[in-house]
Amino acid sequence: MVHSLGLTLYNLRPRRDPTAGAVWPDRMPGRLIWMHSPTAETARGLLELAARLIDEDSVNVLFTCPEAVSPLTGLVHQPPPIDRPAEARAFLNHWQPEMVLFSDGELRPSLLHEAGELGLPLLMVDGRAPYVLKEREGWYPGLMRASLQSFSHVLTIDEASARAFRKSGASLAAVSAVGRMEEDSAALSCLEAERAALAKLLATRPVWLAVGLPEAEEAAVIAAHRAAQSLAHRLLLIVAPEDPARSGALAKRLADDEGWIVAERTHDQEPEPEVEVFVADGMSELGLWYRLAPITFMGGSLAGQGCVRNPMEPAALGSAILYGPRPGPFGGTFGRLGAARAARAVGSATDLGEALSDLLSPDRAARLAQAAWRVASDGAEVTEGVVSLVRKIKRAKV
């Protein structure tokens, strides 16, 4: 690979890196594929791909990401190396991958150059838009084009992303808009006998769930429930507090200050027909509550520190989603749901009450839930295509 002027200037720019001096564990014996993702959120599709290859092809996977990712047997998670020539060469010589997969669009020019020098196949998957490593942003003539030319395949999430990669210099023949890869299923389990018994008890009652609710949002949920009760007097609210230790105090507040009939899971009480609020035992049984509640408000997203739970959890189980302006680590996920009209954003406690009241119409909640389920179940065909491509490249290398 030609060493461009841009790469020379890039390598001259100093960079402080918290991984400096990191000691790598011993390389696993056998074949190894290196996968890299810039964030834990963008890693989800890549992790599902890794799980497939580990289980079905008996390969080892080195996974670099600056953030923690879900553990997998056969996967070694490491922080990425400093993007300078010497560190890149040492990293590649130590791990000796047979193939490299990047995701999202982050480019690490020194690593890509050294991998290209070794003749390693380079793939970009789940591509959104190309960008040079953000800590090293600057003007480097021809650097992005040279880095993108390293990739034999650039698989993007949509056509707009494909245009961004082509415009930035990726080979036209390399770029394909294939869609987003499948993520690990977010569908949480529950005991079917218990679900059936509670569903029979609830019968046709309208139900909504506030999941991961912080204390800062309790007043907003109380106001929304009271407003919606004026339209549906049999409405049941299930609350799963963010902090299980708040369950008792919250139940007391709802009963004493609001005058509602409250039942608590921790006391083995049931949501009998007269119960207006059911306080769950923290978040240990969310698979059960998502299945029973056609509408879920994502706690932490309105006035908290950010959404507490992955919105794909209710999406995968057919519950319509309400969320506020603080997505936390799930900004990209909410973006996908919003683009598909599969979740409804609210900006205030008043908005929450209005949106809840609107979704009490079963057909409106069902449309939202169906769209969310489609987003949650997307990507299986795309992942299958990437698995086939990886296997084809591996066979060509043997």
Image (spheres, rainbow, N blue to C red):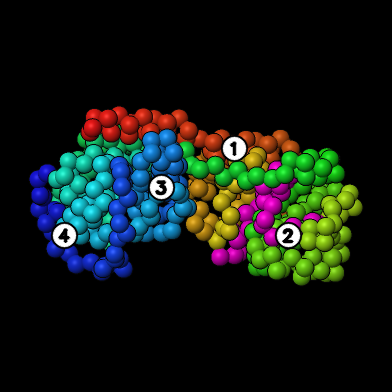
Q: Nearer the viewer, mark 2 or mark 1?
A: 2
The mark nearer the N terminus, 3 or 1, is: 3
- Name the kind of residue labelled 2 in the image: Asp
Q: Which residue is mark 2?
A: 281
Where residue 328 sits: x, y (%)? 52, 59
- Name the kind of residue labelled 1 in the image: Trp
The mark nearer the N terminus, 2 or 1, is: 2
Specify the quadrant of the image occupied by residue 149: top left
Where residue 72 sits: x, y (%)? 45, 49
Q: Nearer the viewer, mark 3 or mark 1?
A: 3
Q: Nearer the viewer, mark 2 or mark 3?
A: 3
Say what secondary structure mark 4 lies in: helix
- Name the kind of residue labelled 3 in the image: Gly
Where residue 301 sits: x, y (%)? 58, 58
Specify the quadrant of the image occupied by residue 170: top left
- Label 4 packing within 10 angstroms: few (<14), some (14-19), many (20+): few
Front residue of 118 and 298: 118
- Name the kind of residue labelled 4 in the image: Ala
Q: Nearer the viewer, mark 4 or mark 3?
A: 3
Q: Which residue is mark 4?
A: 86
Q: Which residue is mark 3?
A: 74
Say what secondary structure mark 2 lies in: loop
Q: Residue at x 13, y 59 (%)?
A: 9
> Of the numbered discs in the image, which one, if any, rests on residue 373?
1
